[in-house]
Amino acid sequence: MRRSVFMATIACVAIALGLQSGPECSAQGKKESSQGTKARIGFEVLEGRWLRPDGGYIIQIKSVDAGGKMEAGYFNPRPINVSKAQATKESGKIKVFVELNDVGYPGSTYTLTYDSKQDVLRGVYYQAAMKQSFDVYFTRMK
């Protein structure tokens, strides 16, 4: 296996230098490109603004990296500090975890699952200050 990867790399260098042409380089490049994309496939669907209709709360997901780390904001209607935001894949489903840490939100969390058919995030909001959990959902803002 290592030898074939090495030979494909040599072929790519040769092609880049104009010494040879062949399918080995393009096949290897496509394989590496698709492996990098595979890690992220699915998470990009989370990007955008999500509204919780029962109170006007908004989760804004600005970006999600290949490891699932999210750059996210939470608004009620003013910004609330997001201390952790992570996306994962479990059993083929995209899960979202958001932890808030601000005045009135000391460790409150959202544990959500993305429903691709309805384009919603559903799950549980844990209000840490009251030690209560609530079933919630967020719809994508257009």
Image (spheres, helix red, strand yellow):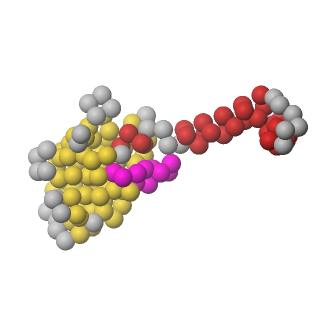
* Residue 19 falls left or right of residue 91: right
Residue 24 at x, y = what percent?
78, 31
* Residue 61 falls left or right of residue 76: right
* Residue 120 falls left or right of residue 78: right
77 relative to 27, above or below: below
Q: Which residues are magenta?
A: 61-70
Quick one: quadrant of the C terminus?
A: top left
Q: Is residue 35 magenta?
A: no
Residue displayed at 17% across by 53% down: 57
* Residue 58 falls left or right of residue 11: left
> Furthest-right residue in view?
19
Q: Is residue 64 magenta?
A: yes
How many labels were placed on the picture?
0
Q: Is residue 86 visible?
A: no
> Furthest-front residue in view?
18
Q: Quadrant of residue 113?
A: top left
Foreground residue among 121 and 76: 76
28 relative to 125, above or below: above
Foreground residue among 63 and 13: 13
Residue displayed at 43% across by 34% down: 92
Residue 38 at x, y = what percent?
54, 38
Q: Is residue 138 visible?
A: yes
Residue displayed at 76% across by 35% down: 25
Residue displayed at 81% across by 29% down: 22
Q: Quadrant of residue 21?
A: top right
Residue 141 at x, y = what percent?
23, 42
Residue 20 at x, y = what percent?
87, 34
Quick one: quadrant of the N terminus?
A: top right
